[in-house]
Image (tube, rainbow, N blue to C red):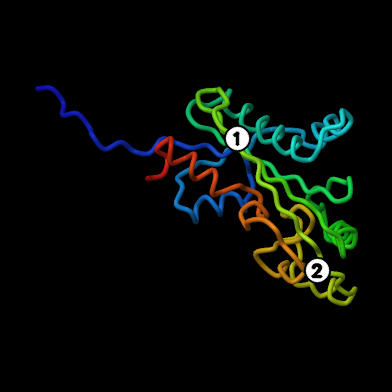
């Protein structure tokens, strides 16, 4: 007897080519089924090479996101999303601080200034690029006091090292800012709303 045809399919698997805890948390909170598979990418070398060629921060973020997606898509079939974020301020690019001292240096450099965040996501399907988006946000830090900075660093601790620029705007970092232009998801490192729209078109999340 022929087997009955199955009409209810499970959602296609999504691979996130990033080990970022913040990006994973955003996808889980939005109800997106995925598996994290960080891509082996020398981000510092890529940034240095692109900046030497005159590339801007938006292009750097987009290229890193694509490189991560491509590296993982070569190893696994299906839908792979790579993501990256670049912070730029007055021509300087910032990375995640390695320790609390470096976080202090970054926050002192950003204090009283406006910087930009570019959050890129690139999707590969069966080893081919099929979608990309780069979100942009502008943030102005207020001229906070050294005493406030000391208290902030003590309260946040090592958590600062998981965020480019040394702040978590979804937590106590909100108090660092005087003005923010852009959506919270982009600031946290992923253009989530645009990505969700793409994932609906692929059946990963429901319409």
- Give how far apart the Cα atoms at labels 1 and 2 are: 35 Å
| Residue 106 lies in quadrant | bottom right
Residue 5 drawn at (x, y percent): 19, 28
Compared to residue 161, the image places residue 54 above or below, namely above
Which residue position is annotated with label 1? 132
Q: Are marks 1 and 2 in contact (CB under 8 Å)?
A: no
Pick whichever, 125 or 73, lies toward us. Answer: 125
> SS class of the residue under badge 2?
helix
Residue 13 as seen in the image, left or right of residue 190: left
Q: Nearer the viewer, residue 207 or 28?
A: 207
Residue 191 in the image: x percent, y percent?
60, 47
Instruction: Give neighbour class at mark 2: few <14, some 14-19, many 20+ (Cα, 10 Å).
Output: many
Label 1 Cα neighbours within 10 Å, binned few <14 / some 14-19 / many ≥20: some
Residue drawn at 60 percent across, 29 percent down: 72
Return the mark for residue 20: none
Residue 173, by quadrant, is bottom right
Does 80 sit above or below residue 35?
Answer: above
**SS at circle 1:** strand
In the image, is 40 to the left or to the right of 91?
A: left
Residue at the disc numbered 2: 153
Which residue is pictured at 34% across the width and 38% down the height?
Answer: 10
Q: Nearer the viewer, residue 148 or 60?
A: 60
Query: x%, y% of residue 172?
Result: 71, 70
Residue 67 on image: x %, y %: 68, 30
In which image quadrant can residue 62 be found? top right
Q: Quadrant of the C terminus?
A: top left
């Amino acid at each position: 007897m022929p087997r009955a045809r199955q009409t209810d399919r499970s959602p296609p698997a999504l691979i996130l080519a990033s080990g970022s805890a913040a990006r994973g948390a955003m996808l889980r909170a939005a109800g997106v089924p995925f598996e994290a598979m960080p891509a082996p990418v020398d981000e510092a070398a890529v940034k240095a090479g692109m900046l030497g060629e005159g590339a801007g921060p938006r292009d750097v973020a987009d290229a890193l996101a694509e490189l991560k997606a491509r590296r993982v898509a070569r190893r696994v079939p299906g839908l792979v999303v790579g993501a990256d974020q670049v912070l730029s301020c007055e021509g300087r690019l910032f990375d995640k601080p390695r320790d609390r001292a470096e976080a202090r240096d970054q926050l002192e450099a950003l204090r009283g200034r406006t910087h930009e965040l570019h959050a890129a996501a690139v999707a590969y399907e069966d080893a081919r690029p099929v979608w990309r988006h780069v979100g942009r946000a502008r943030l102005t830090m207020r001229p906070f006091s050294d005493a406030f900075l000391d208290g902030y660093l003590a309260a946040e601790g090592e958590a600062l090292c998981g965020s480019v620029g040394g702040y978590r705007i979804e937590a106590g970092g909100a108090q660092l800012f005087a003005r923010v232009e852009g959506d919270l998801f982009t600031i946290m490192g992923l253009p989530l709303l645009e990505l969700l729209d793409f994932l609906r078109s692929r059946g990963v999340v429901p319409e």
